[in-house]
Image (spheres, rainbow, N blue to C red):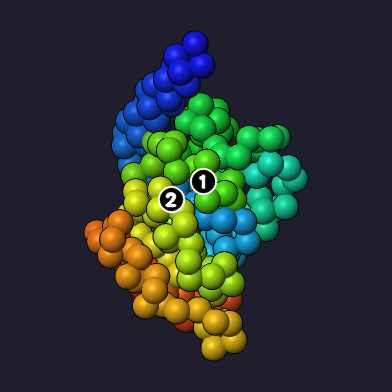
Amino acid sequence: MKIKVVENVLKENVRSAREIRARLDEAGVLALNLTSAPGSGKTTLLEATMKALGPEKRAVVLVGDLQTTRDAERLAGGAAEVIQINTGRGCHLSAAQVAEGLDGLTLENVTYLFIENVGNMVCPAGFDLGEHARVVLLSVPEGDDKVAKYPTLFQPADVILLTKIDLLGVLDFDVNRVREDLDRINTRAPLLHLSARTGDGMDGWLEWLGM
C-alpha cells in the first residue's frame, strides 16, 4: 500500500509538471529550477541576476521556503512579481505548489520564471516542477565533497554553479575534486564559477541564460 501511495504521488507530480511546462511554453516563458543546500547563495544570485536584466527581459520568481517571506522580500524590488510558497515541514516544492503559485503571477511579456526551491540537497532531486532547465548551486563553504555525497542532486543538472568563489583563497576547497566527481556522474552540465557578491564570473552565468 505504501508503495502504491508513493507511485501515485510521483505520477501526479509528473502530470502536473507537464501541464506547467505546456503553459509556460505557450506563454513563451523560460523556467529555471534553482536547487541547492541552504545558504549556498540562491537568493543573492537572483538579486544580482535581476539587476543585470534589461527592461525588455522581465522575470518573475516563485520562492520556496519552510517558513517566512524573507527571501521573497529581498527579491521583490528586482523582479516583476514574486510569490512566496511556504511548505511548512515540506523539504521541497512540488509541481502542484508551483502550479498554484503560477495562478498568482502574470506571465504576459515575461521572459524568465525563476523557481527558488527549498534549500535541501536530497528532496528536490526527484521532483520535476515543469522547469525547462535545472540549476544546481554548490558553494565553497559547503566543501568539495558534496557532489560525491549527493549525486542525485547533480545528475539531472543542466548547469552547475560554484558560488562564493571569493572564499576560495580563504577556505580549503579543491575545485579539481569537484570536477573529477562531476566527470563520473554528469559531463553535459557546464561548471561555472562565480561570486554574486563581487560580480566575478557573473558574465558566464548571464551568457548561459542567454542575456
Q: Residue furthest left?
A: 188
Reading the image, the residue beneath label 1 is: 122
Helix, strand or loop at label 1? It is loop
Compared with 54, 89 (above or below) is: above
Picture coordinates of residue 157 (x, y %)? 36, 53
User: What percent of the width, then of the height, locates residue 185?
Assistant: 30, 56
Q: Is residue 4 visible?
A: yes
Residue 154: image tag: none
Mark 1: few, some, or many residues within 10 Å (few <14, many ≥20)?
A: some
Of residues 203 and 179, the one drawn nearer to the viewer in this rendering: 179
Q: Please name the residue that numbered disc 2 is placed on.
A: 153
How many marks the image carries: the answer is 2
Name which quarter of the figure residue 14 lies in: top left
State the residue at coordinates (47%, 31%).
Answer: 95
Residue type at numbered disc 1: Val
Contact (CB < 8 A) between labels 1 and 2? yes
